[in-house]
Amino acid sequence: MVVRRFVLNADYTPLSYYPLSVWPWQTAVKAVFLDRVDIVATYEREVRSANFALKLPSVIALKQFVRPSQFPAFTRFNLFLRDRFTCQYCGKLRDLTFDHVVPRAQGGRTTWENVVTACSPCNLKKGGRTPKQAAMPLHLEPIRPTNWHLQEHGRSFPPNYLHDTWHDWLYWDVELEA
């Protein structure tokens, strides 16, 4: 049974926008019994024991606030999210990899400020040169993002599966159009 629970922080904001903070049903049920979460919404499906039945939670909120860290981990996924899953040389959205702006052979390091998302053809074309040497300007200068920065980008890439009970909690803080 692949049914997920959407997790809210104690202030009822999403714990994470992207990747969306979801837990397996077993983890959610355990948290309910340990009194660590409040059930906000449920699915129709139930889990049962010999003397107990519980509708599976679809949205849960932590009882204790979890302060997010200021800076995200340097991962391939977070790098792609920072760069909006777009090649920073040509703007393509597929066949993505990453590229060292200052190549490692020229002393470049693997840091937020020196690595960008690139499509394979651009990465091969640039080779072991800097963008200036290859006459391939970057669309945006690479920066070390904050978690807030990645959360904002994550709102643009909704996950493939959103249960109806999740919609009220996902984008409640988005500015409304007049």
Image (tube, grey):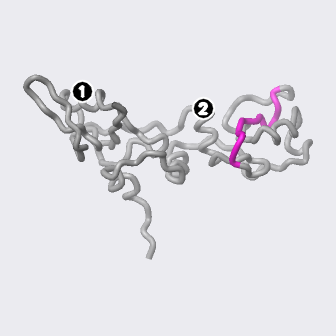
Q: Position of residue 75 (x, y in %)?
A: 60, 32
Q: Is residue 110 above or below residue 157?
A: above
Residue at 71%, 36% in the rendered image: 97
| Quadrant assignment for the N terminus | top left
> Is 144 or 9 nearer to us in this picture?
9
Q: Mark 1 = which residue?
A: 30
Q: Position of residue 13 (x, y in %)?
A: 35, 49
Q: Secondary structure at mark 1?
A: helix
Quick one: which residue is furthest to the top in this view? 50
Q: What span is in magenta? A: 93-104
Q: Which residue is mark 2?
A: 75
* Quarter of image, res 9: top left
> Dot 2 surroundings within 10 Å: few (below 14), some, or many (20 or more)?
few
Element marked by disc 2: loop
Say what amino acid the circle numbered 2 marks. Answer: Thr
Residue located 24% across and 47% down the image = 41
Relative height, residue 112 to residue 161 (above, below): above
Percent across and percent down for residue 29 are: 24, 30
What's the residue at 18%, 28% (across, down)?
33
Residue 112, horizontal then vertical, whole percent: 66, 37
Q: Amino acid at mark 1?
A: Lys
Residue at the location (50% across, 47% down)? Answer: 151
| 100 horizontally vs 167: left or right | right
In the depicted structure, whether residue 152 falls above or below residue 176 = above
N-terminal label among 1 and 2 = 1
Answer whether residue 97 is magenta in the image.
yes
Q: Quadrant of the C terminus?
A: bottom left
